Structures are given as C-alpha cells and as structure tokens.
Image (cartoon, rainbow, N blue to C red):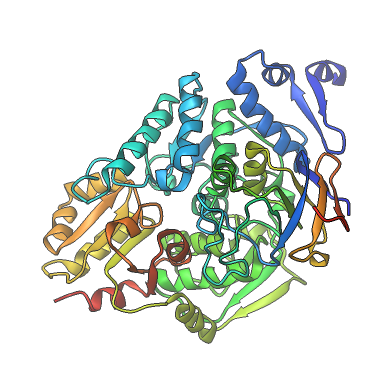
C-alpha cells in the first residue's frame, strides 16, 4: 500500500533547491535528536543532496577518507578532526584512510621532521578514535576493501574513486574529504551523480592509436585525456592487454589533470558492453600526442630522488622494481611507496631487503605528493606517475623528471 | 545573473576570474591564498577577499579541506562563482561558510569586476559602485 510507505517519509525542502525524501530516523538526525555531531554531518550531506537534486539518502558499503596528511589539511584540519573525535563521532561502515604525510612507523629513520610527525600522529589518533582503519593508502581495493559491482560507496581519493567506478563498476561520486567523513559517520550518502546508472554513460570517445606499454605511458595518456575532457566520462578504444596497475595509473592521471571519476574501456571495464557510443565526439590520441605529453611533464634533469608508487605500488609493481635493482647499487635515493599491508608481504618475500641492499627504500603509509619533500632537501624528483608529476611542482616545489621505470633506473644503476 | 545556491551567504567584492579549472589542493597555498599551480592563468595571484570565479574544480578530493583551511587562515575568497560546482568545491564552501553559486555564464566576467553576490537567492550582479 503506497500510503503506508508515505507515512515513513518526510519531505525536506529548502527554497530555491531540490526536494529530498528523508526517513523518520534521518529526520531525527537532522533535528539533532541523535546528537550535535551527526546533525552537523548530516546537514552537510542533505545540503549536497539538495544542490545535486538527490531524491533520497542511500546506505553505503564503505568509505575511503582523504585529507590525512598534516601537510594537506594543516592545523585547521587537525582541529576539525580532533573536535569530532573528542565529541564521540564514530563511523558506521568500513572506513579506510588515505596516505599520511609520513611512514607512520619509520618516520624518524627516513628523516621526516619531528614537529610535522607529532601533528601527523595526532591526526591518525583522531581518525582511530572515530573507528576508522588507519590503512594509510590510496589503494584500499588492494588491501582489504574490495567493493562489489554496483555497490554504493562514498569514497574520496580521486584515483580510488576512478578505480572503484571504472575498473570495479561500483558507484561513488568524487567525495571531498569532509563529505566522505560525513557519509562514514551517517552510513549514508545522497543519491545523485554516479550513483544513478543514467549518469554513467560515456560522453566522449577516445580512440587510442598510440602504442601503450608502461605505467608511464598510461599516465601520459590519462594526463592528456583528463586535460581535454575535464569532468566528462570518456570511453576508450584501442587499449588491450592491460593489468589493473595500468588502469590505476590511467585513472589517477585523469583525475588529477581533470576531474574524471569514471571511464570505460571497450571490452576491459565491466560496464563498457552496456554503453552505446554511436554519434559521440571522438578524440584521437596518436603516438605524437603521447610523446608531447611526456615532454610537457618532463621539466628537469638529474633528479635528487626517484619515487615510484603513485598511486601506491601493488605487490606486482614491487616485485618488478625489486628485480630491476637486485644486486645493483643505486646512485640516488629511490623510494617505492606502498601500503603497510603490501610492505608486510614484501618483507616476508625478502623484497624489502633486496631494495634496501641496492640503496632504495620501501616506504609505507605515505607518498611523494603528501610528504614534506621540499623540507627534506629535495628539489628535483623523478616519477613514473602523471598524477605525481601534476602535483609535485605546486605542492612540493619540485622540478619533475618524468619517465618510465627502465629509463629512470638506467641512470641510477652503477 | 541567476544561478544555483551552493553555499548560502551574501557578500560583495572584486572578481578574480579564471577560465581554467582550479585545483585547491596543490593549486593554492593554504597559508597565503596564493595560486601556486605552475602555468595556471592565476599563478602568483592571491584569492584572499576576492570573488573567485572559475568554471569548475579539478584534481584531488582533499581540495575541500584546503578551502576550509583558507577560511580558517583568513585568506579565503569572499565568494565562489562557478559554471558548474563539483562536490569537492561544494563541500569545502559549505564547511567553510563561503557563499557559492554555480550555473553562471562566467565568460562574461573579468578580473577586476565589482560583484554583488547573494548566494541565498543564487544571484550575482555587476556593480558600478566602488567599494
């Protein structure tokens, strides 16, 4: 009976905006009956829902919270999070954490500044108090939070959003750090944007005619396409035989140079066969385009440090890198950034000691973008990640050397 | 011009206009409010107390905290006007209490314009008055 259902819903309206249906329980949260914190956080969600014309709130399977590094969020973020934690805010769904500004265990050995580290540890403590798992990785899908196809999520971390939507076929908008946190505390997210199948349809076709091979190639492709399509949904053709690592690199780059939260690749991503691309604008990407993108990303020579793992390295990438430098001596510091979970396995496999014997470091919990590189005496950094290449000049005052793993390591092996 | 309310509030000030998307994370220094993204058309300019006009946000989802941090540090823009506001900027503006409107044809605005912003009603007006 429709009337019975209607009794359970309230209509929430703000003049000049949308209409959203809230359940009785949600209405109570909004009225402050479940406490001030939930009220404040739920108000943020309802306002976002109103702006984007959500019809209701939907339950979510998990959350990825970005905005963890002290360098990114500073004292305002730290105070905001401690305030929430001390007032008793607790998450309602599985919630993982983005990378921190340092290796949370070996920060002293690696040379992270002490005042920075003290603030960083307070941020982690606040998150833990809220019941958030301090995974400190941008690749939650590699270490224990693997969504299912079609599952609704509230993830921040633009590269993870892209991976979840595109490679897995789960459904999440590009949440900001605070909106993801609000969703975690309420267990809900407003139903709009990429939660709706009708909004997941490609808007532009990218015909790749270049020879694609390395992670850096896919980074360059992503950088180029993200710049051109901005927030549109691209549909790629001409990409074959890739691993999820290549897709991780592609998606991260597009989400950094643009705001791409979802892409499809013909015959590779799970929703691609559902999509009709007839009549869409087509952009051709040639070998020359990729070469020019490499040149635009590559701003320097003679790096002080080489850093891999943006997004965090998978075990496959760590194995690959360890084999490349096994038994060699590196001239400059080489960091391989990854999650703590991957590092544990790498330790067990002896990969960490191979890397360290060559003079490299397997750095967990952080990455080149969110760590205070410029305070650590580095000014030129080599990367094989277009996302890192995008952020390092502005955020870490680094000149970037961009290249693939082989080319970057060739110059460093004695 | 009439648009959509993203974050409510009323203010007026001088426009700082970019026709390029803006990334708050890595794009704007949270302590000074100066645009630091290399090659950006606003590179070197300060967003403090400006009506910041740009088509849309881009880049990292940490941008919301940067916007909130700009406000806490006293170097935030007075208001934000977008062609289309995405979630990152919307969240930051709401959390920081910065008035924001989208759905505006920003190509008609230029840096130095005096703007009156009524984000409650979603209205932006060019003003002839000097502030």
Direction from residue A59 to residue A119 in the image, left or right: left
If the image is split into quadrants, where does the N terminus of chain A sit? top right
Farthest bottom residue in view: A288
- Residue in front for this viewpoint, B101 or A410: B101
Identified at 45% across, 59% down, the residue is A395
Direction from residue B102 to residue A305 in the image, left or right: left
Instruction: From the top left corner, tell me how far across and down residue A218 is, in percent.
Output: 47, 70
- Residue in front for this viewpoint, A211 or B41: B41
Identified at 33% across, 79% down, the residue is A301
If the image is split into quadrants, where does the C terminus of chain A sit? bottom left
Question: Can see residue A215?
Answer: yes
Instruction: From the top left corner, tell me how far across and down residue B12 is, in percent.
Output: 78, 48
Query: Residue A274, located in which quarter of the rendered image?
Result: bottom right
Question: Can see residue A268?
Answer: no
Farthest top residue in view: A33
Query: Residue A360, located in which quarter of the rendered image?
Result: bottom left
Instruction: From the top left corner, tell me how far across and down residue A217 is, in percent.
Output: 44, 74
Number of numbered discs:
0
Farthest front residue in view: B130
Query: Residue A5, located in which quarter of the rendered image?
Result: top right
Q: Is residue A8 above or below residue A135?
A: above
Identified at 50% across, 64% down, the residue is A253
Instruction: From the top left corner, tell me how far across and down residue A299 is, in percent.
Output: 42, 77
Direction from residue A272 to residue A296 in the image, left or right: left
């Amino acid at each position: 009976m429709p009337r019975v259902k209607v009794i359970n819903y309230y209509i929430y309206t703000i003049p000049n905006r949308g209409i959203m249906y809230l359940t009785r329980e949600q209405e109570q949260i909004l009225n402050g009956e479940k406490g001030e914190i939930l009220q404040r956080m739920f108000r943020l969600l309802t306002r976002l829902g109103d702006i984007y014309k959500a019809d209701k709130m939907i339950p979510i399977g998990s959350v990825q919270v970005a905005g963890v590094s002290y360098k990114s969020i500073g004292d305002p973020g730290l105070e905001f999070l401690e305030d929430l934690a001390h007032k008793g805010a607790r998450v309602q769904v599985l919630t993982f954490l983005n990378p921190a500004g340092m290796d949370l265990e070996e920060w002293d050995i690696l040379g992270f500044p002490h005042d920075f580290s003290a603030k960083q540890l307070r941020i982690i403590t606040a998150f833990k108090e809220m019941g958030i798992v301090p995974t400190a990785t941008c690749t939650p899908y590699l270490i224990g939070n693997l969504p299912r196809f079609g599952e609704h999520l509230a993830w921040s971390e633009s590269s993870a959003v892209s991976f979840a939507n595109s490679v897995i076929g789960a459904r999440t908008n590009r949440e900001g750090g605070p909106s993801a946190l609000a969703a975690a505390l309420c267990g809900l997210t407003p139903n709009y944007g990429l939660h709706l199948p009708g909004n997941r349809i490609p808007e532009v076709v990218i015909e790749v005619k270049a020879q694609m091979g390395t992670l850096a190639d896919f980074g360059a492709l992503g950088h180029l396409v993200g710049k051109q399509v901005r927030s549109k949904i691209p549909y790629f053709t001409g990409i074959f035989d890739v691993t999820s690592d290549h897709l991780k690199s592609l998606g991260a780059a597009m989400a950094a140079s643009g705001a791409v939260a979802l892409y499809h690749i013909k015959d590779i991503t799970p929703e691609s066969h559902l999509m009709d691309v007839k009549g869409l604008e087509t952009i051709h990407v040639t070998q020359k385009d990729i070469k020019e993108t490499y040149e635009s990303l590559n701003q320097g020579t003679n790096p002080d440090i080489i850093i891999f793992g943006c997004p965090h390295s998978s075990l496959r990438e760590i194995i690959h890198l360890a084999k490349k430098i096994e038994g060699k001596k590196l001239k400059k510091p080489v960091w391989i950034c990854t999650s703590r979970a991957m590092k544990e396995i790498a330790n067990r496999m002896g990969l960490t000691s191979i890397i360290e014997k060559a003079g490299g470091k397997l750095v967990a919990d952080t990455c080149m973008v969110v760590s205070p590189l410029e305070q650590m005496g580095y000014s030129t950094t080599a990367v094989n990640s277009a996302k890192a290449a995008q952020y390092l000049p502005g955020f870490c005052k680094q000149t970037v050397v961009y290249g693939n793993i082989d080319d970057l390591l060739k110059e460093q092996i004695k | 011009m009439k648009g959509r309310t993203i974050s409510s509030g009323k203010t007026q000030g001088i426009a700082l206009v970019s026709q390029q998307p803006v990334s708050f994370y890595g794009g704007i220094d949270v302590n000074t409010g100066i645009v630091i993204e290399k090659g950006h058309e606003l590179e070197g300019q300060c967003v403090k107390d400006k009506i910041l006009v740009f088509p849309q946000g881009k880049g990292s989802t940490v941008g919301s905290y940067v916007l909130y941090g700009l406000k806490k540090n006293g170097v935030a823009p007075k208001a934000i006007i977008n062609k289309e506001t995405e979630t990152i900027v919307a969240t930051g503006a709401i959390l920081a209490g910065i008035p924001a409107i989208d759905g505006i044809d920003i190509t008609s605005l230029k840096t130095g314009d005096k703007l009156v912003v009524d984000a409650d009603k979603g209205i932006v007006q060019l003003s002839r008055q000097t502030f």
